[in-house]
Amino acid sequence: MPNQSTPVLELKGLHKCFQGLTAVSKLDLNVFNNEIIGLIGPNGAGKSTVLNMIGGTLKPTKGHIFFNGKEISQIPAHKRAKIGISRVFQANVLFRNFSVLDNVLVGMHLQSKVSLFRVLFQRKVVGKEENKLRHKAELLLASVGLDKCFEERACNLPHGHQRILALAVAMAVNPRLILLDEPFTGMTDSEVITMMDLVKKLRIEQNITCIIIEHNLKAVMGLCDRLSVLNFGGKIAEGTPDEIFNNPIVTEAYLGREEEEDVA
Amino acid sequence: MKDKRKLKNLAGGLLTAVILLVTPLFIENIYWISLLVLICINILLTSSIRIIWLTGEITLGHTGFMLIGAYTSSLLMMRYGFSFWFTIFCGAFAAGVIAFILAFPYRRIRGIYFTILTVLTAESFRNLAYNWREVTGGRTGLFGVPSPGEVLIPWLGTVNFGGFSEYYYLTLFFVSLSLLILYLIENSRYGLIWKAIKEASILAGTVGINVIWYNVINFAIAGFFAGLAGALFAHFQHTLSADPRSSFGVMTCIYLVVYMVVGGEKRFIGGIIGVICLTLISEFSRSLEEYQPMLVGAIAIAVVIAMPEGFVGIPNRIRQLYSRVAR
């Protein structure tokens, strides 16, 4: 169950402008340890922009991001991976011409000690370390059900497996917080269930916190502890899935206002 | 299967080594030995360009670092009397350091803009050398670059590396060692990271790879070996000119990239094969005179269209054809 005492992630007054267009407006959000938070809202609400700012691929125009109490608003993406934030992108962003195993091996970059000296003069030691990482990568892939295609090129995998591989690459970073941007897009119902089970397993076995952007409402209902609804860059509602789906403001954001008919 | 391939590669490597070592014994013609030296230097240059290509970028400015290595090594020897064995590393090191410094702003830029930047940089270095009369001799050039001189080698005695055959073996030694280092680096985690940056730099960043830093290291390593090639070139030619039509011009870089592509840019050995094949083709087609570059261009176009994997793909194609015919 989520730890409600100290937030793992705090967004305070987060604001992002793109040349006059406000994509995210003064967003406040607290995410607690072991929570699965859903970030939902209509297209163009600013959800991916929020995730990009948390992940470090975009810098906020104003506002602050705190991770485990430390401000991380200005630190680049690779340093955020070091402190335990990893990401699954919306589009199938993978090392497409790499094998499945190599994708995860790259994801394990932080677990390797890279130096030119070691590469040239300590080849045996480096070789042993790489073999250990390779074994770890194989175990990770087996845990997500991709143990039969280690040498398959990532671009040759079916779409659902590519999404699972993207999750595996994010897991290879050993994160405390995973950002999932529409992880269920393009998946069949059974693949969605598999992915949901993987995310639940992550939370239970590795005590990971997740922020998920998703339009698949069934998945969101089945997975998330809390939902935060964005519209036009601002938060319009927050609560449990049941509270959110019975909220008329949320319905209006998705479907528009019902016009009253004049009865003659 | 892997062991068989390893054995094949080892056998191929040994055979190549034997051929390379005994070739000067059978070639008395100084011209052909000179050509072998230049082939070795071009192999090193092409292989160092390939290092940058691993990150997905094409440089047309490598001759700039070659020039830095050439002039640094030459001037240290001529003006200060340092030994060749010191100056050659100074030349490579100077090129590497300048590449390292330039890489910080350069490697934030991608695609055609990066390529243009490299061209402008190389041309700037060349123009500086062309006009800096007090240091480089300016438009007159630098004459009398000394050869490495005599060295006492265990079991071989005193060897004078001023001779063509001796300089060939010297170049072979440096180039082979450099290729081994480049091969080991490419097949290490560095190579994996560089290729990952080429595939998806944004994803590479989110798994903890400092993309800028690894691009900087990449550029510096490539610059170092280009500088080494330049130093080898300088002490072989004994004359340096920064004229636009010299070996430090943009055309040289374009040819080096063509060698890499025609040989096969996906394999380490591709550039080596491209240099050897196209250099020999150019030599045997000398009689075509001004049409010779058109021949090289035509071969490049034909390879890119009909055999994009390059000359390294020929054995595979033959195997496929044979199995089709056998059926």
Image (spheres, coloured by chain):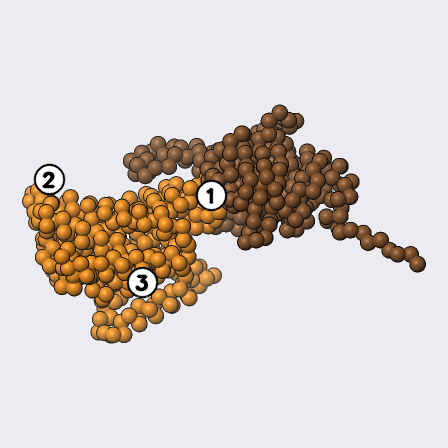
Q: Which chain is brown?
A: A
The label nearer to you, 3 versus 2, is 3
Label 3 amino acid? Ile
Rounded to the nearest angstrom, the CA distance separating label 2 from label 1 is 50 Å
Residue nearer the viewer, B212 or A149: B212
Q: Which residue is mark 3?
A: B254
- Say which quadrant the N terminus of chain B sits in: top left
Residue nearer the viewer, A81 or A51: A51
Counting from the top left corner in percent of width and height, residue B24 is at 15, 55
Q: Earlier in the sequence, mark 2 or mark 1?
A: 2
Query: Dot 2 falls on which chain?
Result: B
In what element is the residue under mark 3? helix
In what element is the residue under mark 1? helix
Q: Is residue B166 visible?
A: no
Mark identifier at residue B154: 2
Q: Which residue is mark 1?
A: B205
Mark identifier at residue A3: none
The label nearer to you, 2 versus 1, is 1
Q: Which chain is orange?
A: B
Q: Earlier in the sequence, mark 1 or mark 3?
A: 1
